[in-house]
Image (cartoon, rainbow, N blue to C red):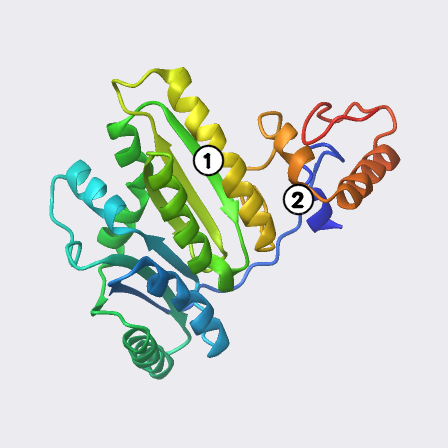
Amino acid sequence: MEQLLAGSEGTLGIITQATLKLFPKPPYCSDILAVFPTAEAAVTLASTLLQKGILPTCVEFLDQTTLHAIADFLQEPLPGQADGHYVIIEMESADEDERDRHLLQLDEYCRAGGASQVLLAEYKKIWHLRKSFAEAVRAESLCVSKEDVVVPIEREAELLQKIAATTARYHLTVRLAAHAGDGNLHLNILKPPAEDYDAWQRRVQAHQQELYTYIYQLGGRLSGEHGIGYKRKQLMKKFTNPEELAMMKAIKQAWDPNNILNPGKIFDLP
């Protein structure tokens, strides 16, 4: 039930009270920075760790072009930015022995996956860098098309290859970060300052249609976090399996027969 409501964007009900189950904060938390020569090798690490039974708190990805943009924004060089793409891994441990075991395993699997550097990162510095992604993009362009796509984590490398090919073909300037452990990629497409908005938007939309078609072929969806709302409603209609969409509408009509809960979002009812 909670999953159904959490994904409904306010169209099925209003949550007035929530009971949370809290867990003690683990006494040890380690942050690892791994630098990979290719983006595909970098994002493949997430599925490798899961296959090995390693469950990090998070696995974050930044491609090399984005690293340079962040370095320019922060006005400081970043470790390993000239060598490739970043994967930031946060790992929680119950005691010192488990922490040491986790660090050894992460080093082993990163290097086996092709990492040129595996570093123990300083918490505040590495997460300040990661959280500067959005600000760095804003500093480059105030006009940005933000994609929030999601695919099964074992298909992330294929998606990155597709994005590299299509954005080059449509001559798009992109900055990319990902929650690699969730298969959720944030693709920011920047409008060049001198380009006409309508011409840029036509290229963005043409790219969007091709990208979404491919993502659904991989078993993905057009939004992993940001939602559908009103803006992506027509895309939802075009790319969602008709049977799935019909089921969503049936649930909406059963729960909200008067259509008073956030009407007009996600899809339209008859």
Whether 43 is drawn above or below 193: the answer is: below
Image quarter of the C terminus: top right
The residue under label 1 is 207
Find the residue positioned furthest to the left. Answer: 76
Q: Are marks 2 and 1 in contact (CB under 8 Å)?
A: no
Q: Nearer the viewer, residue 64 or 59?
A: 64
Relative to residue 63, is residue 74 drawn left or right? Answer: left
Residue appearing at x 33%, y 73% in the figure? 113
Q: Which residue is mark 2?
A: 6
Asked if one can make out residue 9 in the rendered structure from this viewpoint, the answer is no
Q: Residue 69's quadrant in the figure?
A: top left
Identify the element where label 2 is drawn. Answer: helix
> Quadrant location of residue 228?
top right
Residue 240 placement (x, y as % from top left): 68, 42
Q: At 41% across and 41% down in the image, what residue appears?
A: 187
Type of amino acid under label 2: Ala
Q: Tag 1: residue type? A: His
Residue at screen point 29% across, 26% down: 141
Q: Say whether residue 71 is left or right of residue 114.
A: left
Which is closer to the viewer, label 2 or label 1? 1
Residue 59: horizontal and vertical position, in percent? 40, 60
- Cα–Cα gap, marks 2 and 1: 30 Å
Question: Residue 33, percent across and down?
Answer: 26, 63
Task: Establish if 108 lies above or below 116.
Answer: below
Would residue 99 be visible to someone looking at this image?
A: yes
Q: Residues within 10 Å of mark 2 (few under 14, many from 20)?
A: few
Instruction: Identify the secondary structure beneath mark 1.
Output: helix
Residue 147's place in the image compared with 90, above or below, is: above
Crowd tier of the residue under label 1, counting other residues whose Cα lies within 10 Å: few below 14, some 14–19, many 20 or above = some
Res. 104 mark: none
Query: Which of disc 1 and disc 2 is earlier in sequence?
Result: 2
